[in-house]
Structures are given as structure tokens and as C-alpha cells.
Image (cartoon, rainbow, N blue to C red):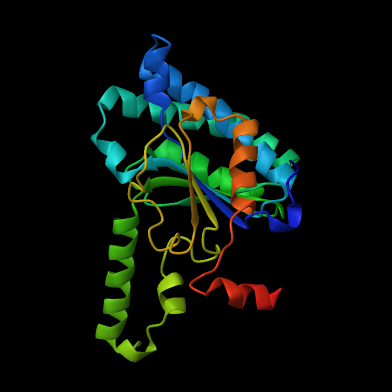
Amino acid sequence: MNLEKERLPKHLAIIMDGNGRWAKQQGKPRVFGHEKGAKTAREVIQRVAELGIPYLTLYTFSTENWNRPKLEIEALMRLLSGYLKKEVAVMQANNIRLNTLGDISQFPKSLQKELQKAKEQTQNNTGTVVSLALGYGSQQEILQMTQQLAQKVKEGTLSPEQITYTTIEQHLYTQAIPPVDLLVRTSGEYRISNFLLWQIAYAELYFTDAFWPDFTTEELHKALLNYQQRERRFGKPVNNLLSMR
């Protein structure tokens, strides 16, 4: 079946899971899985850009990932640095704008500078916005938002009655990005794992057994087809939707 471009999600988010288990199956160290996963991310990003999906968010490094072994974290930082150096030119060629979500203050200073440079180099691109969730945790994001709003109320620049859904969204990392339409998780796990909890309120969820390194563009196609076969009601009864068509 062919995809209907007018029915593609505006915001696709992916929990890229299973690199380590994929590497174990191959008898390789975990970092080998992360390296293959980076190549998969490149292919998926390019395909999403070709399809014209406006927003893609990839769960790249969570707040919980800091609990991983030090050597693995260091390898992930090196991998991300190398990825940026190689992929900015590809993003430019595909009119992709790079964005980040999360707290990268604990990242190596050199990597923070590379991320900022990559964002600046692609900031004028008008195609797909690719957001890498780095040092990201949704509970942390919501906590920070609450603290910011509480501080404004304390200072008298905002009243509790003025706090709306829009106010909240303006204080999240995703303030300029629409809600998630489709959330994909790989590797056969059925968890959200502290990812975009506010933003996925009405998202369609798609789970696949494929480990992230095996998530080919064909697997992406399956996920998008599955999304297009669903009826998104947003709380409305089915007959109401039919009358709106």
C-alpha cells in the first residue's frame, strides 16, 4: 500500500530502543549497537525529510541514561560528536533544521559547542525539524515548567488564573513544536519511558519488535501505514467525525 502524503503525521516521535540487545545478538559490545543505531537514525531522518513530515523527535539520551556505565556514556558522547561532524552537511543538503530538547549542561563542553554550531548552521533550513532529545526527561521538563510558572506567580507577573494549556506549552522544551501525532517505540518494549508525557496526550502509539538498528525505512513505512489506518477521534464519538467529513 502507498502512503497518503496528506495523512502523514505532522510530528513523529521515536523511542530508539534496542541497540544494546541487538549488539549482544551479534556477539558485539554495546557500543557497536549504538554505532549501527546512528546509521539507522541517518536513514530514517532522510526518509522522513523526503516524505515531508514537518517534525521528527528522536529520544537520543535520557536523564536516566546517566546511570549507565561511565565507559558507555563516554562512547555515546564520542559517537554523537562524530555524528554531528558528518551529518550537518547531509542536513544542509536535505533542508533539515537541527534542534535539541533537554538539559545538556552535563555534556562535555566541546560537545555542547558542536551542538550549538550545528543548530546555527541549519537554523535557516525550512524542511523537517529534527529534534534530538538529549539529557531529556519529561518529568524533569514538567518540574522545571512548574517552577518557572510558580516563580512568575510569586513575582506577581502571572496570576494562577492566567495559566492555560498554552502557557504551559510555552514553558516546555517543545514550545515551538506541535503535539506528537505518532509515537513509535522499537525493540518490543511497551513503555513510554519518561518521554514527552505532555506532548503525547493524544498521540497514536505504535510498538514494534524490531530493535532500533533493524528499523529500516520499510519498518518506518509499516508504522506510517498503520497510523493512516487509524481513526483519530480526540474524544469525539465516531458518528461526529463522520459528519465532519
Residue for point 43% across, 64% down: 201
Of residues 128 and 199, the one nearer the viewer is 199
Of residues 235 and 56, the one nearer the viewer is 235
When asked about the image quadrant of residue 242, the answer is: bottom right
Find the residue positioned furthest to the front. Answer: 239
The C terminus lies in quadrant: bottom right
When asked about the image quadrant of residue 134, the answer is: top left
Count of residue discs: 0
List x then y, in percent, for residue 75: 38, 24
Horizontal arrangement in the rendering, residue 122 relative to residue 150 (left or right): right
Of residues 61 and 198, the one nearer the viewer is 198
List x then y, in percent, for residue 35: 49, 22
List x then y, in percent, for residue 190: 37, 42
Find the residue positioned furthest to the top. Answer: 27
When asked about the image quadrant of residue 162, the answer is: bottom left
The N terminus lies in quadrant: top right
Horizontal arrangement in the rendering, residue 187 relative to residue 128 (left or right): left
- In the image, residue 155 sits, relative to residue 70, either above or below, namely below
Of residues 114 and 224, the one nearer the viewer is 224
Residue for point 71% across, 52% down: 127
Residue for point 68% across, 38% down: 47
List x then y, in percent, for residue 66: 27, 37
- In the image, residue 36 sits, relative to residue 206, either above or below, namely above
- In the image, residue 111 sits, relative to residue 119, either above or below, namely above
